[in-house]
Image (cartoon, grey):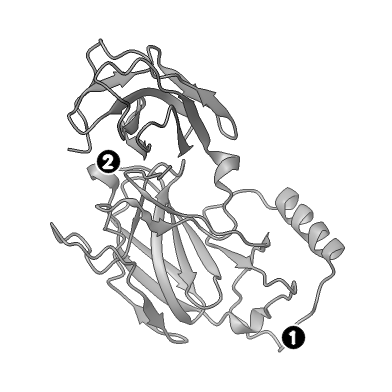
Amino acid sequence: MTTHHNRWMMVRVFSTILLFVIFSACNPPSVATPTLSADVVATVVAGTMQALPPSATPTVILTLAATHTLVSTATLTAAQVSGKVCYPGGIATDLKAYFQNTVTNLAVELSIAAGSAQYSVDVPPGSYIAYAWVTDFSNSGSYSACGQTPGCGDATPKSFTVAPGQKVTGIDLCDWSHGQFDVPYPPGFQPMARLGVVAGSISGYPYGSLPQLAVVAFSQDPPYYWYWAGTAAGQVYYTVPDLPPGDYQIVAYDDADHAGGSPAIVTVIAGQTTTADISDWASGWPANPLK
């Protein structure tokens, strides 16, 4: 089964650890890169998660290599990145912005309050991509080759480079026009810990043999996003993964726009699979949003 969404998702599987680094005005001495045992890494992860509450201060997420080596903070000489902030569908909402090194996968996370028109953040020098997610990970945008250009087909995140002490402007987080698969999740993010799944059977199709279908999950919560998954011809089950928690209406469409749905609104819970069988082909359903 081929799975899609009206947002783009790229899930990375890493051995991860969250380290919060306080940038100092002093130049720290060079530190030899230590190698940690698995037990020590586990202890550091547990201690970090318990000791550090959420903060509006930019934080550094360090994705470790398989050898569990730490990067010296002496490499974190700050540069500055700034730009405009845009919002999905013009709806102002709290955002988390991520400035991810394209070589090391080191990412700086910045909290952006709803309605902010500009941002500025210090990052270590290097090559980056910049992207943002709404706080429930239901929609994402990026600094891309398209920006806000209508009809632009280039959804590739646009990399940029910052040198030590340099101020780079115009890194606008304004491209919310593409699907979810154009924007990565931040390093260490585990979708199933924050998102849920809807799955079920497909029965009672009254128009002949069961064709390919597009199964759409319509969010019943503002700002009313929708998500979809495709099925193969003859497939009598479906799965729509990676849904933010909330209430959904589930509707399937064939290529002729015949529609069938699950009779009841279903509630998605993070980390769980909710069952919604598609069996009602007689009721009135929303128009196919894919057309």
Quadrant of the rendered image containing residue 171? bottom left
**Crowd around label 1: few <14 · some 14–19 · many ≥20 (10 Å):** few
- Position of residue 56 relative to residue 254, above or below, is below
Q: Is residue 11 left or right of residue 255?
A: right
Amino acid identity at mark 2: Ile
**Which of these two is toward me, 121 or 32?**
32
* Residue in view at x 74 percent, y 71 percent: 68
Mark identifier at residue 163 = none
* Residue in view at x 24 percent, y 52 percent: 177
Which residue is under mark 2?
91
Q: Is residue 207 left or right of residue 136?
A: left
Q: Is residue 248 left or right of residue 44?
A: left
Mark with earlier residue (1, 2): 1
Quadrant of the rendered image containing residue 225? top left
Which residue is under mark 1?
31
**Crowd around label 2: few <14 · some 14–19 · many ≥20 (10 Å):** few
- Position of residue 240 relative to residue 94, above or below, is above
Q: Are marks 1 and 2 in contact (CB under 8 Å)?
A: no
Asked which secondary structure carries label 1, the reply is loop
Amino acid identity at mark 1: Val
Image spot of residue 200 (x, y percent)? 48, 24
Where's the C terminus, which quadrant? top left
**Which of these two is toward me, 55 or 206?**
206
**Which of these two is toward me, 265 or 201?**
201
Image spot of residue 129 (x, y percent)? 40, 70
Image spot of residue 150 (x, y percent)? 13, 57
Asked which secondary structure carries label 2, the reply is loop
Q: Is residue 243 visible?
A: no
Q: Is residue 77 visible?
A: yes
- Position of residue 236 relative to residue 34, above or below, is above
* Residue in view at x 33 percent, y 31 percent: 216
